[in-house]
Amino acid sequence: MIWDSLYLSDEKNTQKGTHYLLVHHLESLYPPTGWTSMDFFNQRERKLLEAFDGFITSSPYTTAYLQSVQLGKKDIITIPPALNFQAKINREKITPPINITLVANIIERKGILPFLQSLEGRKLQNVNIKIIGSPDLSPDYTQKCAALWQGSTTVEFLGSLPHRKVIALYENTDLFLSTSFMETYGMAIQEAAAHGIPLLLLDGGNVKNHLQNGNGFLCNTMEEIIDAIEHLSHDITPLNRAKQKAALLAQKEYWTWEKAALVLYTHLL
């Protein structure tokens, strides 16, 4: 039996057999205000996870986390998500304005509000930022973000879009932006990288593992993110250099769901 961490609860032990947990995200990785990561894990998650025989994770980052919390001798298999489309790689040289795309649901963990707050008052030129994501998961948080992006000449909020439209937007994106404080994998980042789009990422969780061979830039704070955007808007050379490397990286053979399924099947035999 494979359980999804979205439905992690005390009701698991209702059937006999071997039980694995497919770990997308754990709250202890980005705990609520007032909690430390380990306190939340020990009080809210440890007992639930100890009941499983093994775990299926989406990234080396999550695997390392589960190993660090000492759950005993548990079987852990890491299977990164695969792409379900063939990406088109745009090799044309980037010219101003820079089209930046940020794909994330409007929730606290994704860092949209502090990004917009850091952006406020900065007179960025030759930059267009599009934000795509659901505004419905945290209405109060969305309202705070909307107060900043409404009327902005730099930021445009597109709301939720069908996946095919997001993919179409990637084809005209010069720079993919992630302001998330924590990603256990980063599917949107993976999809952008598959299109040969340079990445501008806030360091958090598995995010840095998407940066390879100079295909983007890693920042530690929101201010560094804004500074990087401003610098690239004045000197686009580093961005075009990153695009060349991103395009070469995107040419590699894709990890497919068929290969992922075979790895899981073979491991569980």
Image: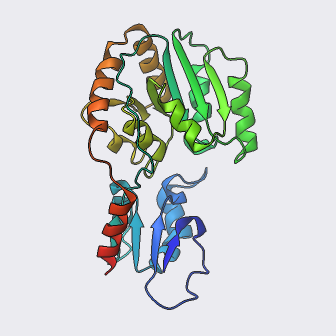
Q: How many marks?
A: 0
Q: Residue furthest bottom?
A: 16
Q: Position of residue 115 (x, y in %)?
A: 56, 28
For residue 65, which quarter of the picture? bottom left
**With respect to residue 67, does 29 lie above or below?**
above
Which image quadrant is residue 131 in? top right
Residue 215 drawn at (x, y percent): 31, 31
Residue occupying the point 40% across, 53% down: 82
Give 167 or 98, whichever is nearer the viewer.
Answer: 167
Q: Residue at x 39, y 74 (%)?
A: 71
In the rendered image, the vertical position of residue 70 relative to residue 176, given as above or below: below
Front residue (pair 207, 160): 160
Q: Whole-percent x and y of residue 111? A: 56, 37
Q: Is residue 68 visible?
A: no
Identify the residue at image location x=31%, y=67%: 263
Residue at horizontal 62 percent and vertical 32 percent from the top: 113
Q: Nearer the viewer, residue 219 or 85?
A: 85
* Left-right relation of 154 to 145: left
* Residue 157 appears in view: yes
The image quadrant where one finds the C terminus is: bottom left
